[in-house]
Image (tube, helix red, strand yellow):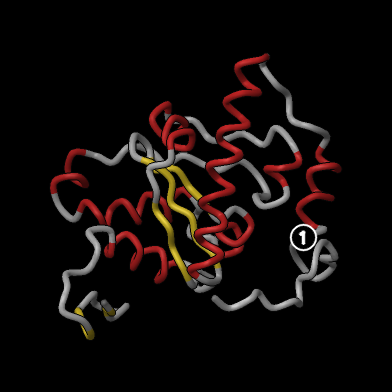
Amino acid sequence: MTVRLSDGAVVDGDLRPSTDTETHRCLYRAFPSIGGVTHTHSTHAVAFAQARRDIPVLGTTHADTFNGPIPVTRDLTPEECAKDYEYNTGVVIVDTLYEDDRRAVEVPAALVAGHGPFTWGTTARKSLEHAIICEAVADIALHTLSLSPAAPPPAHLLERHYTRKHGPGAYYGNPEAALPKH
C-alpha cells in the first residue's frame, strides 16, 4: 500500500491504508529527517503514556539513543478527538517537539498521552529499533523508579553516551558498516 504524502491519496495497492496513516503523514511532513515511523502499544512505554509522564533519563542506556527525556504529549481535546483524530494525534506530537527537526533527530520518540509511543528514524528499520529501545528504557525506568526516587546521572556522562553514537564525532560501533540484507 502506497499513499501520496501530500494528500494521503492511495497511489498503489488494493488494501486500505493503516488507520494511523494521517498521524504518520503529519510527522513526515513536519520533520524532513524522518524516513520511517513506528507505533506500538508496548506495555512499559504505554504505562508512562497513561500516567502522562515523560520517560526520564536515568542512565546511560537511555542516553545512548535519546538525548533527553522521551516526552509525553498533552491530552487531545474533545474537538480534536471528534474530528481528524489521527491527524491531530500527529499534531500533538509535532507540538510537543516544538516543530523542531533537530529535536526529532535527537529524541526520536514521543508518548501520546493516554495512548502509547510513536518512534521514528531515518529509515523504517531505524524507527523500529527506536521503538524497541523506547520500550526497554521505559521498562528500566519503571524498575529504577520503583526502587527509589532516582536522580539522573551527571550531564557530562549522558552527553558522552549520546555523542559517541551520534553526530560528526561519533565513534561507537561500526557506523559505516552496512547491515546484512535478509
| Quadrant (top left/top right/bottom left/bottom right) for the C terminus | bottom right
Q: As drawn, which residue projects farthest toward the front?
A: 182
| 181 displayed left or right of 50 | right
Mark 1, residues whose alpha carbon is within 10 Å: few (<14), some, or many (≥20)?
Answer: some
| 161 displayed left or right of 130 | right
* Residue occupying the point 18% across, 56% down: 84
Query: Residue 27's quadrant in the figure?
Result: bottom left
Query: Whole-percent x and y of residue 69?
Result: 61, 41
Query: Whole-percent x and y of residue 133?
Result: 59, 48
Query: Residue 176's quadrant in the figure?
Result: bottom right
Q: As drawn, which residue projects farthest toward the bottom?
A: 11
| Quadrant (top left/top right/bottom left/bottom right) for the N terminus | bottom left
Disc 1 residue type?
Lys
Residue, disc 1: 165
* Residue occupying the point 14% across, 52% down: 83
Q: Nearer the viewer, residue 100 or 17?
A: 17
Query: Whole-percent x and y of residue 89?
Result: 31, 51
Position of residue 140 relative to residue 3, above or below, is above
Which element is circle 1 on? Answer: loop
Position of residue 3 relative to residue 105, above or below, is below
The tally of labels here is 1
* Residue occupying the point 61% across, 63% down: 102
Q: Nearer the viewer, residue 155 or 55?
A: 55
